[in-house]
Image (tube, helix red, strand yellow):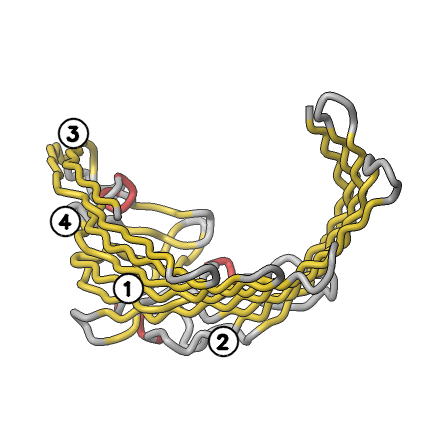
Amino acid sequence: MALGMRYDFRVMSVNGYTSLSNYTYYDDFKLYSNFTASLAGHYQLNDNWDMRANIGWSWRPPDINELYAIGLQEGSYWVIGNRHLASERGYKSVVGVRYRNTWFNIEPSFFYQRINSYIYDHIGTGKDRFHNHPSGKYPKFIYDQDDVQLTGGDIEATAKPFEGLTLVAKGEWMFARNITRNDWLPFMPSDRYGLSATYTRLLNKSGKWRATLSLSGIYVTKQTRFDPDKDLVSDSPDPYFLLNGTAEVAWRMPQHRELKLMLVGDNVLNNLYKEYTDRFRYYAHERGANFSLRTLFKF
């Protein structure tokens, strides 16, 4: 069992103009403070099973960009800050169990999180949906805050059926609700599943040379838990699958030094896909197949 607590302050003194077209001067002094605390416990049921639980109370003051940003962000969309944002305050509880033996390990966990005055940005409405600029027309995202509830979980299973081979399977889920407006939060990740296999083998009896081959696949579902009115487009990207691989040879040298030669492939099937949480998806797909040769020297 562990318990921790602290009290934090943050002070901001900011002055400037609201925009280049509206020369309204502001001079703000902001003081934020709040408690942060956590309580965690771990219990060993037997040689194979153990469980853990944690609950934490935390806060986050708005950052300078969320308060005062106004202009083009990442060259793709227009952002409007909100000088009147308050601090986020909330708590999060996590419960997990684990089973393990000599060759198999599985660990599911679940969480519940409540955040009051959660800060996020969303597409504007009406005349605030787009911003006209000499360089082009950009979607306008405005910072806002509401009370939200996040629930979800993940699971990871690892198996080592024989020496040198490791199999890992993962799954992640999250449900993000806007309690104030009774709808879904925008730009939250969709469900994803992964499976990987890694095989390592010594190339000589002394163990100085080692070869490793790994292959991993990830499947990301279509995001259906979102509000089309708070997005630039009314639909989310299609589900996608990515296959990645790595082949490496390592040479263990004297004095704990090591040299690695690696061939790394990302999206080796060259699948065409878009990630829902990436705002560049409005304009282009993600990167296609990518292969690289790397050399790592540990000294």
Q: Residue at x 18, y 40 (%)?
A: 5
Structural distance between the alpha carbons of marks 3 and 1: 28 Å
Picture coordinates of residue 68 (x, y %)? 24, 42
Structural distance between the alpha carbons of marks 3 and 4: 15 Å
| Residue with the mark numbered 3 | 13
| Amino acid carrying mark 2 in the image | Lys
Place residue 210 in its image quadrant: top right
User: In the drawing, does residue 73 fall left or right of residue 268?
Assistant: left
Asked if residue 166 shows in the view, the reply is yes
Relative vertical location of residue 50 with respect to residue 7 in this rendering, above or below:
below
Looking at the image, tell me whether mark 1 or mark 4 is earlier in sequence order: 4
Residue 124 - label? 1
Looking at the image, tell me whether mark 2 or mark 1 is earlier in sequence order: 1
User: In the drawing, does residue 33 fall left or right of residue 136?
Assistant: left
Closer to us: mark 2 or mark 1?
A: 2
Structural distance between the alpha carbons of marks 4 and 2: 33 Å
| Residue with the mark numbered 4 | 86
| Amino acid carrying mark 1 in the image | Gly
| Residue with the mark numbered 2 | 222
Q: In front here: 187 or 179?
A: 179
Q: Residue at x 52, y 62 (%)?
A: 100
